Image (cartoon, rainbow, N blue to C red):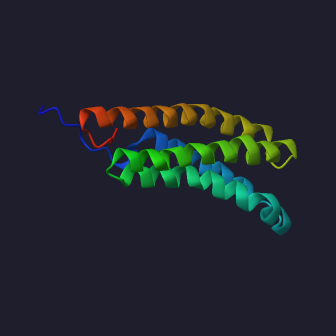
């Protein structure tokens, strides 16, 4: 092989797949909320969770490592906001079942770790002149 990495399509990235699973759970929760609950809690919860995958996608589509990292940092912050604040509040307030909470937690930790690893690998790629597609 010539030493170049093969391009991995976005949908094949485990980190992106995890973000989509989390979005699917968030949508299920959002779909059953009343209008008032959607406006006071649900909209912000859903936007922050959907932002995780959206920013992974946008960062992955960028070429320069600094642009990539910027979107991965936003994705990590959205994950923190969505899970640690909005979903936690929803669980506390009884909007999220124990089963859903367990699914959320099972996705959150590996997603958080993979985001941190993606940020680190993207930063390291600048040393080797790679474009940071990992």
> Residue 80's quadrant in the figure?
top right
Which residue extends farthest right? 93
| Residue 85 in the figure: left or right of residue 18 | right
Whether residue 54 sits left or right of residue 50 in the image: it is left
Q: Is residue 70 left or right of residue 98?
A: left
How many marks can you see? 0
Residue 114, x across and y down, in percent: 49, 34
Residue 106 at x, y = what percent?
A: 63, 33
Q: Residue drawn 88% across and 46% down? A: 93
Place of residue 12 in the rendered image (x, y in percent of width and height, measured from the top left): 39, 44
At a point 26% along the width and 39% down the height, the residue shown is 130
**Residue pushed farthest left?**
2
7 on left or right of 116: left
Q: Nearer the viewer, residue 129 or 18?
A: 129
Q: In the rendered image, is residue 27 in sight?
A: no
Find residue 124 and report its image quarter: top left
Residue at the spot 79% in from the left edge and 37% down from the top edge: 98
Q: Quadrant of the C terminus?
A: top left
Q: Is residue 74 above or below residue 14?
A: below
Q: Quadrant of the N terminus?
A: top left
**Res 40 → quadrant:** bottom right
Q: Residue at x 62, y 36 (%)?
A: 108
Res 39 seen here: yes
């Amino acid at each position: 092989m010539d030493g170049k990495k093969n391009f991995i399509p976005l949908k094949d990235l485990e980190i992106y797949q995890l973000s989509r699973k989390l979005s699917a759970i968030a949508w299920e929760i959002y779909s059953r909320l009343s209008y008032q609950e959607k406006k006071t809690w649900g909209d912000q919860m859903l936007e922050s969770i959907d932002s995780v995958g959206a920013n992974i996608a946008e960062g992955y589509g960028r070429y320069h490592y600094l642009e990539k990292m910027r979107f991965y940092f936003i994705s990590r912050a959205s994950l923190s906001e969505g899970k640690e604040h909005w979903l936690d509040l929803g669980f506390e307030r009884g909007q999220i079942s124990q089963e859903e909470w367990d699914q959320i937690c099972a996705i959150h930790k590996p997603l958080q770790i993979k985001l941190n690893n993606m940020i680190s690998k993207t930063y390291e790629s600048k040393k080797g002149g790679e474009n940071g597609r990992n």
